[in-house]
Amino acid sequence: MDNRANFGSRLGIVLATAGSAVGLGNVWRFPTMTGENGGAAFILIYIICVIALGIPCMLSEFIIGRRVQANAARAYSTLANGTPWRFIGYFGVFTGFLIVSYYSVVSGWCLQYVTASVGEGLSGDAKSVASYFDTFVKNPWMPVVWLVVFFGISHFVVSRGVEKGIERASKLMMPLLFLLLVVIAVASCLLPGAGQGIKFLFSPDFSKVDSGVFLGALGQAFYSLSLGMGCLVTYASYFKRDTHLVKSATQIVAIDTLIAIMAGLMIFPAVFSVGGDVSAGPSLVFITLPNVFNEAFAGVPLLGHIMALLFYLLLSVAALTSLISLHEVCTAFIHEEFHQSRQKAAAIVTAVGSILGIFCSLSFCHAELSLFGRSLFDLFDFTTGQIFLPLGGFLTSLFVGWYVPKYIVREELTNNGTLRGRFIGVYLFCVRYVCPICILLIFLHQMEII
């Protein structure tokens, strides 16, 4: 597409694409998985998985997106030449649309907790904090208000375009996110007894490692890097032709992994400081941590409020960077395939996504909003995270590894011969064999088949 928008700078490319990958998967899910799987040993295995699986899969999506320079559906269709492979792109857009709907619900929770941190909403003992969360998510209108607000913010950014909207917002939000991480991590590590939390993160105990830990690390690498949902294909379509794909992927993965580890430094020293449960699971962020802040800074309650405020502000920023990328996947598809203006396409995504998000939110308090024995929220979460994402990544690996002509792969990775292609053979081996096998193992594990 001759007049297609591009990111204006290499820094913009790295920050925007890293922002797509960095989200609740890093700040919420990664500490949860680390706590449930023994700490440092899980992190080491996760890093190996990111290198062996994450970088090849990310490069595959970059190759597809930049080669065609179109939305995810058209990018796959163009390279598929009328074969059934073309449906992978449509599948990715559909997956992104489902995720953006229920993801907005959790994002809205983050904003609620920002306001609650200012007041007395998160004060009290562990029981009252747990009761606060349960009462809030089952409220029929407050979560809805916040998800609409969050969708409105992402709509404002996306509707302004690639360079003036997404790139400019990423240059503001990613440094802010990193700064907040550093401040909270330092404060957490200075708490009495925090050393046990640091040891938990960096002193591996391999006696706790089993097949479940390996597969959990593989799944987290996939989830954390936003693979298989059309985000990276869409963002790569805005890359300039001289963008170094391998270097960009390496930098993005490094930023993503650093932020995930810093999230652990932010959370676990504080939890150990008060004798909390590091394996609390998904409730760690919204139930366990408010109580941790209350206990850790009991002598100076104001400081506890400030730390909680900074933490949930951080969580909101992380959620927003990912929501913007998911929003863009769907907006670019409608904008290009249905020939709508960017503003109108963004408005359609915001409207329909908000409606689906509202139903997902209401499924917490209305049992009738359920299918196949799951609430609508849980159904969207389960089908996308445990079925659609692994399936999309699996098919993309096979598509690039076995169908896309090798000369296209070489041209994209070497920028038409201007860069050395020393690792193309290694990349093709990974994307043909390692990635499909690993993703298949993730899928079978999540389905509890193995």
Image: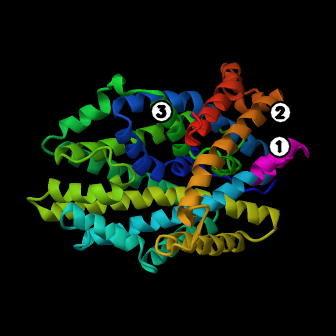
Spot occupied by residue 42 in the image (x, y as percentages of width and height):
40, 32
Question: How many other residues sit within 10 Å of disc 3, few (<14), some (14-19) or many (≥20)?
Answer: some
Q: Amino acid at mark 3?
A: Gly
Kindly identify the residue that appears in the image at 50 percent across and 71 percent down. 361
Q: Which residue is mark 1?
A: 85
Spot occupied by residue 55 in the image (x, y as percentages of width and height):
59, 33
Residue 117 lies left or right of residue 423; in this view the side is left
Closer to the N terminus: mark 3 or mark 2?
3
Spot occupied by residue 437 in the image (x, y as percentages of width and height):
65, 28
Question: How many other residues sit within 10 Å of disc 1, few (<14), some (14-19) or many (≥20)?
Answer: some
Which residues fall within the magenta stretch? 74-90
**Quarter of the figure with the C terminus:** top right
Above-or-below relation of 425 to 114: above
Q: Amino acid at mark 1?
A: Trp
Above-or-below relation of 122 to 23: below
Q: Which corner quadrant of the image does residue 109 belong to?
A: bottom left
Closer to the N terminus: mark 3 or mark 1?
1
Question: How many other residues sit within 10 Å of disc 2, few (<14), some (14-19) or many (≥20)?
Answer: few
Q: Which mark is residue 212?
A: 3
* Residue 93 magenta: no
Q: How is the image coloured?
A: rainbow
Residue 26 lies left or right of residue 92; in this view the side is left
Extreme residue in the right direction: 82
Q: Are marks 1 and 2 in contact (CB under 8 Å)?
A: yes
Q: Which residue is mark 2?
A: 403
Foreground pick, 316 / 200: 200
Frontmost of labels 3 and 2 is 3
Kindly identify the residue that appears in the image at 68 percent across and 31 percent down. 436
Instruction: Report how far apart the C-alphas of labels 3 and 2 lie in the structure.
Output: 32 Å
